[in-house]
Image (tube, rainbow, N blue to C red):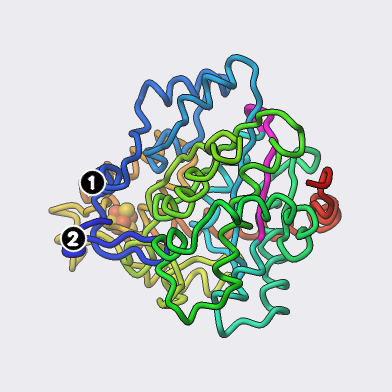
Amino acid sequence: MPDADEFVVTPYEVRGKVDYDRLRELFGTQELTPELLQRLRRLAGGELHPLLARGIYYSHRDLEGLLTAFESGRPFFVYSGRGPSGPLHTSHLAQFELCRWFQQRLRVPMYVQITDDEKFWSRAGLSREETVRWGYENLYDILALGFDPKRTRVFFDSRSIAALYPLAVRVARKITYSSVKAVFGLEPSANIGWIFYTALQTVPAFWPSWAEGREVRCLIPCGIDQDPHFRLTRDVAEGLGYPKPALVHSRMVPGLLGEAAMSTTGGSEDGALFLNDPPKTVERKVRNAFTGGRATVEEQRRLGANPEICSIWALWRTRFAASDDELDRLTADCRSGALLCGDCKSRLLERVQPFLRDHAERREKVKEWAESTIVTEAPRPI
Ligand code: SF4
């Protein structure tokens, strides 16, 4: 756990000015080195996803072992999930976009878990109907990123329980209450659904190995704040006869109001750009966003601005700069004072609005086949 005085990063809270190298040391993860990135680039046919090339993903666990196995012909899949409690915002997409990239470049299967049960157990204010409805809404957004229906499988927990449960039974016997409590910080008053959920979240990492009766490794892209969740999965893997899942960790995308991470849990909705925000709301949020600019135009022209602390620059870096060259030019112009924040925001809006329009069209189309990706049956009894 990080020093509370400096910053706090847990699966539920990101606060303060995060020192990501220090966090990596505290969590005991490995650096995503230039050599490892080069290896990925080669495997992917000569290009890296911008989230990798621009350093958003910066840390990993066991990625080297997974790539070595893949290079010798052994399969792996990517896995990511979503707890459906509301609409997705742009920073939620980072993990799914990297999964899609792996699927497209390395032609590997993708497994998505929609944890409608967990959100019902953990959020007292949400009804079952709401978590299920958001589950579908979020699933359409995820699939609309360009996943291949033939290589994508979805565990929608309450609908996929027959497929998950036989393996969850075995997993649950390996996880103790004290380890769940240590990771999730559960109080004695926590409902028992929340406690059991840990087993269900672990199942997808092993499910393809179980279903295919051979070793199929798992790679999980996630924010580094989610690493503790998957430590439990890794801890029980070998005892169940499955390989430990590998992880690649991203930095957090800062919130629009200057928060350490874009999130709406306990914060303002204006801190995040939601995929279903109407254009006027998007404009207002971007115009009001926290920047690294100066107090006056004259000062900014003279002294330049600070992109490292700017929420708008973070959006350019993580998603909207079309190339590394464009990002470098924009960063240099920001630092020199050649670019003013109002103009920078106008330019960003010209990218964000069409992106959201196109996304809305794509998500309508995936509704035709989304249902076919949901797994409802176990491959065999256990
Ligand atoms: S010019 Fe753009 S990147 Fe630089 S501080 Fe202003 S809004 Fe941020």
- Is residue 111 one of those drawn in magenta? yes
Q: Are marks 1 and 2 in contact (CB under 8 Å)?
A: yes
* Nearer to me, 121 or 309: 121
The circle on residue 22 is 1
| Residue 347 percent across, percent down from the top left | 44, 55
Q: Amino acid at mark 1?
A: Arg
Q: Residue 334, can we see it? A: yes
> Residue drawn 86% across and 55% down?
368
Q: Earlier in the sequence, mark 1 or mark 2?
A: 2
Confirm if mark 2 falls within 8 A of ligand 1.
no
Furthest residue in direction top, as rendered: 72
For label 2, the residue is: 6
Q: Amino acid at mark 2?
A: Glu
* Nearer to me, 196 or 328: 196
Task: Look at the image and give the residue range highlighted in magenta.
Answer: 104-114
Mark 2 residue crowding within 10 angstroms, few (<14) / some (14–19) / many (20+): few
The image quarter in which residue 271 lies: bottom left
Classify the position of ligand 1 by quadrant: top left, top right, bottom left or bottom right.
Answer: bottom left
| Residue 274 percent across, percent down from the top left | 55, 67
Position of residue 123 relative to residue 59, above or below, is below
User: How many marks overall?
Assistant: 2
